[in-house]
Amino acid sequence: MVALARKTLVYEWRRFLPAMLAVGFAGLLQLLQIALVLGIFGSTSLYVTGSSADVWVGYPGTQSVGLGRSIDADLQSRLLMDPQVLRVEPYLWVDGDWRGPRETGGASVFVSGIDPAADGLMFSKVLSPTLRARLVEPDAIIVDRSALDQLGIGIGQSATINGRRVRVVGIGTGLRALGGVNVLCSLDTARRLDNDVTDNGPTYLVASLRDPARAATVAARLRGATSFGPYTTWSASDFAQRSVRYWLFDTGAGAGVMFLAGIVFLVGAAITSQTLVAAVNGSIREYATLNALGVGVGALRKVVLEQAFWVGALGLLGASVLGIVLLLLARSQDVPVVLNAPSALACIILVMGLAAVSGLAAMRSLRRADPATLLR
Amino acid sequence: MHSGNLIEPARRPALQAVEVSKAFVSGHQRTQVLDRLSLAIEAAELTLISGPSGCGKSTLLAVLSGLQQVDGGQVRALGSELGQLDLRALERFRLQHTGFVFQGFNLFPALSAFEQVELPLNHMGLTRDEARRRARQSLEEVGLGQRMRLRPSELSGGEKQRVAIARALAKQPELLFADEPTSALDAANGQIIIDLLHRIAHSHGTTVLCVSHDPRLVVHADRVLAMEDGRILSDRRNQAPLSDSRGTPS
C-alpha cells in the first residue's frame, strides 16, 4: 500500500507545520496547566501524602485537611483496640499569625503539631530523621526553604506565632502550602501556640495499619462509635483526594481549568482544521483523479483522517518533549508541578480528539474532489 | 491485427450513447450542451472527438465515462447502463473498467512515478506483488522504466503525462478516456502521447476515447468525430493512421 498520507506529510511538511504547532501548543498548554493545578492543589493534601498514616480520624464533614475541628483524644484507645491498628498518634492543626524579626507584615501560618518520635507517622516522607529529632526542643519549628523570604527569617532566628516565641531549628523542602506557610513543630509546642479555647483535643488522629492495603475496610469499621463525640474516619487516599477535590471544585479552580481546556481545544481545532483543509484543497485535483480512477471517497477520507492522526501524534510528541523539559525546569525552581497518569491521559485524549475533529472538518472539503470538474 | 477489428460490423460497441441530452443551468440561463446525441464507440481503437471549445465534447466524455449523469437518454458501457448505477456502483465500475488521462497531469507531488501508478492498484484488491509488477510494466511500456523513482518535480511535462497514462494503463482498463491529453505539451511530447494512446488501443484491445481540439491528433486517430453545438457533424475513419507506421508491439 502506498502510504500517501505519510509521504505527503513528510514531503509537504511546511504545509502541515502550523497544524502540528497548533496541536503541540494546545497539548503543551493543557499539560502545564494540569500539572500546575495539580501541583498547587496537590500541596493541600501534602499532610496526608507526605505522611505514612493509613487511616485518618477527624471531625465529620471535614472538607480539607486545613479545615478540621478538634476531636476527643480518648478515641486513641478506641482505635488501638482494633487488631489491624499498629500505631496511633495525634496531629494538631493550629492557624497562626506570624511576626518575624524583619518587617514582613502579617503572615498566615499553618502550624502542624506532630509526634517528633523517630518512628512518627506525620510528615515521615518529607522530614529527615535528624530534622525531626530537632523538634523535640521546646518552641522549635521547621519551615520550608521557599518560605524563608516570605517569613523574613533564617535558621536559628526567633519569631512569634500567635504571640508566643518560636525558633527556627531546621529548613525542610517539599513543605509548601497553599494560602499560607506550613510550620512544623512538636505536639507540645503546638498546644502552647494554640490560643483557641474551644480546642480541647487533637485535630486528627492518624493510624498506621499492619496491612496498609486494607485502609478502606479498617476506616469503615472504625466509624460509628458514639461514646466519643463526633468523629469520622477516612482512608489516607480518600482524605487526600477529598482535600484536592475541595480546592479544585469548591474554589472554582477546576471550572477555570475546564474553561481553559475548552478554549485551547477550540483554538487548536480551528487552526488545525484550516491547515488540513488547505492541504486537502492543495491536492484536490489529485484526489479527484483518484476518484475518477475508481478510488472511493471513503478511501480518500481515510487519507485525510490519517494525516490528522499523524499531525496529532507529532504535535503530541513535540508537546511531550517540551513539556518534560519545562516540568523539570519548574521542579528545579521549586514551582509545584505534578503530573500523574490520568491527567497525562486526559491531555493525550484532548490532543488526539482535537486532531480527530480537525480531520473530520477537513474531510468535508473532499466533497469538492468531483472528477467531472477535471474535464474542461 | 487492428485492421481486422476495424471492419468487423457485427460487434457490440464498447460504449454507446442513445439520445443523450445534457443541459447546464446557471442563473436563469439554460444551456443545452448535448442534444439527443447518439453515438457508438468501437473497442480496440482510438476514437478522437474534436471540435471547438464549448462544443460539448468534454461533457460528452464526462457522461460516457460515468463522471456525470445525463438528463435524458442512455449511456451503455461494456453492457452496463450507467444511469442505473448509484454513486458507489459507478465508482466500482470505474475502478474495474476505466482509466483516465487529464489535461493537467494531477500527480501527487510527494509520490514517485512508481507510487503514482501503484496507488490506484492498491484499491483494486490486487496483491502487493501483482500491483508492483503491473506498475513497473506500465511505466516500462510508456518508456519511463529508468525514471520511475523520480517525483513529479523531477520530470518534464511529457514525462508527467506518460506517468498519468501509465497510472491509467496499469489498471488494465477496457475503457480509457483522455481529455485534451496533449494541450499542455509541445509538439514532440504531444506526438509521443498520441502514439502511446494509439498503441494502447491496438495492443491491449482498449477502447480509447480522446477529446481534443488539437489538430495534430486528427491524423493519428482510427476514427474522428467532429462535434459542434452538442451534435456530431462528421464521423470519419482513417484507414491507415500515421502513428501506426512505427509498428505496435503485440
Image (spheres, grey):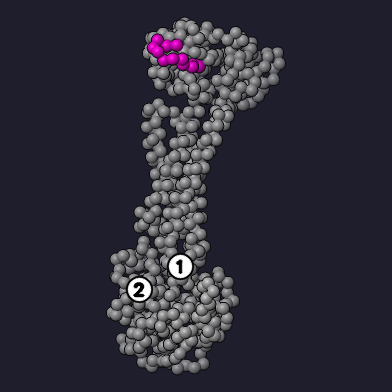
Q: What residue is disc 2 on?
A: B161
The residue drawn where x is 50% and y is 51% is: A356
| Image height of A369 relative to A133, above or below | below
Q: Quadrant of residue A285?
A: bottom left
Disc 1 is attached to a residue of which chain? A
Answer whether residue A374 is magenta in the image: no
Disc 2 is attached to a residue of which chain? B
Report the quarter where the C terminus of chain A lies: bottom left
**Secondary element at image label 1:** helix
Total numbered badges shown on the rendered structure: 2
Give the residues drawn in magenta, as a range. A99-112
The residue drawn where x is 45% and y is 67% is: A288
| Image height of A64 relative to A95, above or below | below
Q: Quadrant of residue A27?
A: top left
Q: Position of residue A284 (x, y in %)?
A: 43, 64
Residue B65 in sight here: no
Q: What residue is disc 1 on?
A: A288
Q: Position of residue A19 (x, y in %)?
A: 42, 50
Mark 1 residue type: Ala
